[in-house]
Amino acid sequence: MFTGIIEELGEIVAIEPLPDAARLTVRGPLVTSDAGHGASIAVNGVCLTVIDATGSDSLTGGEFTADVMAESLKRSALGDLAVGDRVNLERPMAADGRFGGHIVQGHVDGTGTVLQRTPSEHWELVRISLPAELARYAVEKGSITVDGISLTISGLDDGAAGGDGASFEVSLIPATLAQTTLGIKQPGARVNLEVDVIAKYTERLLARTSAQDDQAEAEGAIA
């Protein structure tokens, strides 16, 4: 499990296309300091499994390699990456670690597009499109993960009925702008989105409860 607190900005150093997959090599001296084969590292919010890693004291400067399967490429914006691109990196939270963000699984639900950036003196407002199938999970002042970053929704536009044209707004402090990719993503860029998993579980449980109540009512009427 992750918390959406980015540890460092990494860099894509190689991309190898594979049948129905891609192999990424990423430079990240901090996250590779204790990484080995089988470790998990979130890259722009996508949980990837390390297949090879070199320590930060090596000539390669601390790199790891991970395979991205077709499902992840389909659901995320990792397929948009090119060599030289910066990426947000985070290791899973240790059991005795400080919980700084919110529950982040590293399982991207879909992608949004940066629509607008509005700078101000001490922060910057960024508006991002929200897919219709995810709009119902977003609430103002609630949490959302954007490219692996735990953020608070400061504004929400539900768009037309059914969520078409929905978008949300996040307010970014200077530290977030300096230490994550959202400091450089411009309008038109795609970003990975993961909604609050608690909202998804709640919806699922309520739907099952409602269905069970309807079934019990129907059986009672028949009896």
Image (cartoon, grey):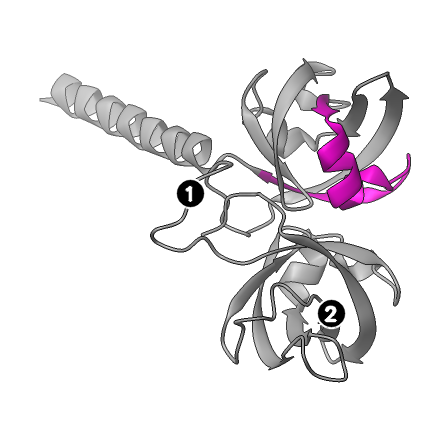
The three-letter amino acid code for the residue at tag 1 is Arg
Give yes or no for residue 81 being in the magenta stretch: no
**Neighbours of disc 1 within 10 Å: few (<14), some (14-19), many (20+):** few
At mark 2, the secondary structure is strand
Residue 65 left/right relative to 183: left
Give whichever of 24, 70 is nearer the camera. Answer: 24
Give whichever of 122, 103 is nearer the camera. Answer: 122
Q: Is 189 located above or below residue 50 in the figure?
A: above
- Residue bounds of the magenta highlight: 168-194
Give whichever of 82, 68 is nearer the camera. Answer: 82
Residue position for label 1: 98
The three-letter amino acid code for the residue at tag 2 is Val
Discs 1, 2 touching: Cβ within 8 Å: no
Q: Quadrant of residue 158?
A: top right
User: Residue 140 at x, y = what percent?
Assistant: 59, 15
Circle on res. 204: none
Q: Quadrant of residue 63?
A: bottom right
Circle on res. 26: 2
Residue situated furthest left in the rendering: 223
